[in-house]
Image (spheres, rainbow, N blue to C red):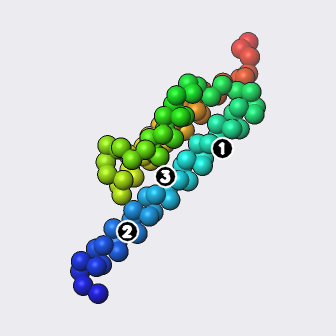
């Protein structure tokens, strides 16, 4: 196996790993939103969720598709936004 083939194999493995991370985050985002909706809790603006899903699926990206780092960042920001929309649990009352 020459060096070009080795680099190509490494690039494909890295791209597949990044795609797997992006898809895992998408599943996590969908589950988090579904759980929040079932519990009757706010999920924040709907456009954040659908925008993140569309950004992952659409072919137009900031970075070319074999590099899923921008997709991962968008999904992480959407997941963080969903989790931040949860109301805080009631704390202890003051004196």
Q: How far is the residue under mark 2 from the one under mark 1? A: 28 Å
Q: Regarding mark 1 in the picture, which secondary structure is present there?
A: helix
- How crowded pointer 1 is (Cα within 10 Å; few <14, some 14-19, many 20+) is rated as few
Q: Quadrant of the C terminus?
A: top right
Residue 76 seen from this side: no
Percent x, y of residue 56: 46, 45
Q: Which label number is shown at residue 94?
A: none
Q: Which residue is rendered at x = 23% and y = 80% of the image?
A: 3
Q: Regarding mark 2 in the picture, which secondary structure is present there?
A: helix
Q: Quadrant of the N terminus?
A: bottom left
Q: Which residue is rendered at x = 51% and y = 31% of the image?
A: 48
Percent x, y of residue 77: 47, 37
Q: How far is the residue under mark 2 from the one under mark 3? A: 15 Å
Identify the residue position indicated by label 1 in the image: 31
Nearest the camera: 94 or 4?
A: 4
Q: Which residue is rendered at x = 35% and y = 44% of the image?
A: 61
Percent x, y of residue 21: 49, 56
Residue 79 seen from this side: yes
Is the residue 15 above or below the residue 9 in the image? above
Q: Which label number is shown at residue 12?
A: 2
Which residue is most to the top?
95
Q: Which label number is shown at residue 22?
A: 3
Query: Left of 70 or right of it: where is 45?
Result: right
Labelled pair 2, 1 in contact (Cβ < 8 Å): no
- How crowded pointer 2 is (Cα within 10 Å; few <14, some 14-19, many 20+) is rated as few
């Amino acid at each position: 196996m020459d060096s070009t083939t080795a680099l190509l194999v490494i690039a494909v493995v890295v791209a597949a790993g990044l795609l797997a991370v992006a898809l895992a985050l998408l599943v996590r985002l969908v589950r988090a939103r579904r759980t929040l909706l079932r519990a009757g809790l706010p999920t924040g603006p709907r456009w954040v969720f659908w925008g993140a899903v569309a950004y992952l699926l659409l072919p137009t990206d900031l970075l070319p598709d074999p590099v899923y780092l921008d997709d991962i960042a968008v999904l992480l920001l959407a997941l963080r936004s969903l989790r931040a929309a949860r109301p805080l649990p009631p704390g202890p009352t003051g004196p």
